[in-house]
Amino acid sequence: QVQLVESGGGLVQAGGSLRLSCAASGRTFGSNTMGWFRRAPGKEREFVASSTWSGVGKNYADSVKGRFTISRDNVKSTVYLQMNSLKPEDTAVYYCAARRRGTTSSRGEEYDYWGQGTQVIVSS
């Protein structure tokens, strides 16, 4: 079992930056593929980024490539999402997720554990 708690959301102006954190507890964080997803008001959940346990394998949605960076610290059992050059369309609740096994994936149904989410609002 893995428990996930996100933090770092908030209100930021367009062009600004935020760093989200996801603290994990449980016995297998170091071997889990981790992902970030988001859900904007009135829209379906969408994939943002994922990272293998080693941090070598990473995958990003086209909409965030070059602006967002996923990273992880397995000693601290924490995964991060650095978000730069934020746009109003990045406004959403951001969720951290973990897979029990498997490599990076953009499919939410392939993740086994989810956090409660953290709100990001980007003003124009």
Image (cartoon, rainbow, N blue to C red):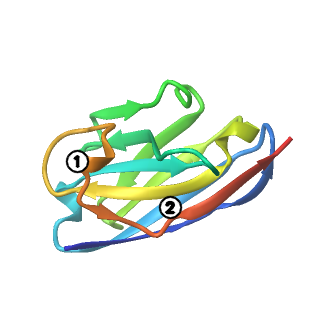
Residue 26 x %, y %: 23, 75
Q: What residue is pinned by disc 1? A: 110
Near mark 1 (Cα within 10 A), the count class, few <14, some 14-19 or many ≥20, is some
Q: Nearer the viewer, residue 66 or 89?
A: 89
In terms of secondary structure, where does tag 1 sit?
Answer: helix
Q: Name the residue under label 2.
A: 21
Q: Quadrant for the C terminus, please.
A: top right
Q: Quadrant where the N terminus lies?
A: bottom left
Query: Could you say where residue 62 lies in the image, as x and y percent from the top left?
Result: 49, 24
In the picture, measured across the screen, residue 9 lies left or right of residue 73, that is: right
Q: Which residue is drawn at 17% across and 56% down?
A: 31
The structure residue drawn at horizontal position 29% and vertical position 59%, both measured from the top left corner, is 74
Marks 1 and 2 in Cβ contact (< 8 Å): no
Amino acid marked by disc 2:
Ser
At horizontal 47% and vertical 57% (from top left) the residue drawn is: 95
Of residue 107 and residue 48, the one placed in the foreground of this image is: 107
